[in-house]
Image (cartoon, rainbow, N blue to C red):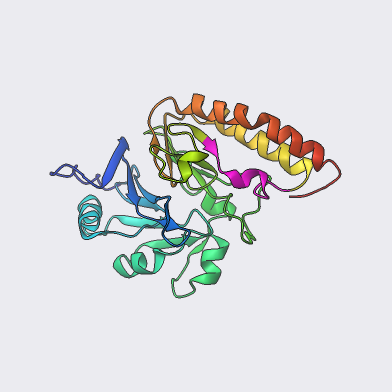
């Protein structure tokens, strides 16, 4: 394999190094007609080969693009771009125009909605989910709808980079470092929590789906030695990741129990 490129000569101001060979970029995103800032993100993972996998795509300022180019030798080492959330689509057209030589892997919704990108496949396919194991592991939450996302934003690909002990997630979990009005009324700063959509259709409406989701989260906690968690909305939980995940599951146990009881007769997802 070719050697990895040297570390950037200038300090990074936009792509934040969360650990060895893992970089996270925060990007602006507003909802409700621009009234509420929720933010979004993308991440870059440098593989042992020296090439990079981009997890999602985000709007790049000129300065952020300069940093990405510096990390990837002008994009030459950006080997793969992986769409991780069915509804995180807005930046992909411009990103592909800037980096057309990477291999793009989409969610089913990306493949359908952005046909001008020559997708190499769907990330939900087993071959792509396992493509970078064990260096970079990708999982989709059980008990949720990903293939036919409808209007639900809860499910997404969750990634774990083993070397940096960093997990990247879009909407399944949230971590608000400093929530703005009115988000701070319902979201405690500095607390990792599941997206509110979890109980509103994000997890399938059956006891089977609820228990599959609960078991999936327990598997993530068991299998991944997580330290850092990069969430799209709207920050990074640095350190103590596995305990944060465990606490997030404990916090929703009553909700999941109620859901399982309510949907006891459904077969669901």
x 44%, y 71%: residue: 117
Residue range of the region highlighted in magenta in the rendering: 193-204
x 83%, y 47%: residue: 266
Q: Residue furthest left?
A: 9
The picture places residue 241, in percent across and down from the top left corner, at 46, 28
Compared with residue 37, is residue 178 higher up or lower down, i.e. above or below?
above
Nearer the observer, 223 or 114: 114
Quadrant housing residue 62: bottom left
**Would residue 105 appear left or right of 62 to someone viewing this image?**
right
x 48%, y 59%: residue: 32
**Would residue 51 appear left or right of 223 to someone viewing this image?**
left
x 22%, y 56%: residue: 69
Q: Is residue 200 highlighted in magenta?
A: yes
Q: Residue furthest bottom?
A: 116
Instruction: State the count of labels.
Output: 0
Quadrant housing residue 261: top right
Q: Is residue 205 highlighted in magenta?
A: no
Compared with residue 159, is residue 84 higher up or lower down, i.e. above or below?
below
The picture places residue 135, in percent across and down from the top left corner, at 43, 39
Nearer the observer, 100 or 232: 232
The picture places residue 162, in percent across and down from the top left corner, at 42, 34
Nearer the observer, 16 or 225: 16
The picture places residue 213, in percent across and down from the top left corner, at 67, 39
**Would residue 148 appear left or right of 60 to someone viewing this image?**
right
Q: Residue furthest right?
A: 265
Compared with residue 222, is residue 178 higher up or lower down, i.e. above or below?
below
């Amino acid at each position: 394999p070719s050697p990895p490129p040297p570390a950037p000569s200038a300090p990074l101001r936009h792509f934040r190094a969360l650990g060895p060979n893992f970089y996270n970029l925060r990007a602006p995103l507003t909802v409700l007609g621009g009234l509420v800032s929720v933010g979004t993100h993308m991440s870059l993972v440098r593989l042992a080969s020296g090439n990079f996998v981009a997890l999602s795509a985000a709007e790049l300022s000129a300065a952020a693009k300069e940093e990405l180019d510096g990390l990837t030798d002008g994009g030459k080492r950006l080997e793969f771009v992986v769409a991780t959330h069915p509804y995180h689509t807005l930046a992909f057209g411009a990103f592909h125009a800037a980096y057309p030589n990477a291999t793009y892997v989409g969610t089913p919704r990306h493949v359908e909605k952005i046909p001008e990108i020559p997708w190499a496949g769907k990330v939900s396919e087993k071959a792509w989910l396992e493509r970078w194991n064990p260096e970079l592991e990708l999982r989709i939450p059980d008990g949720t709808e990903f293939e036919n996302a409808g209007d639900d934003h809860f499910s997404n690909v969750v990634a774990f980079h083993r070397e940096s002990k960093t997990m990247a997630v879009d909407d399944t979990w949230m971590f608000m470092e400093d929530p703005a009005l009115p988000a701070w009324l319902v979201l405690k700063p500095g607390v990792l929590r599941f997206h509110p959509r979890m109980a509103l259709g994000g997890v399938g409406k059956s006891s089977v789906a609820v228990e599959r989701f609960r078991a999936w989260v327990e598997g993530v906690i068991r299998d991944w030695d997580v330290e850092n968690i990069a969430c799209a909305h709207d920050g990074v939980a640095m350190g103590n990741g596995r305990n944060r995940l465990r606490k997030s599951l404990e916090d929703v146990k009553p909700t999941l129990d109620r859901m399982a009881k309510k949907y006891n007769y459904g077969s669901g997802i």
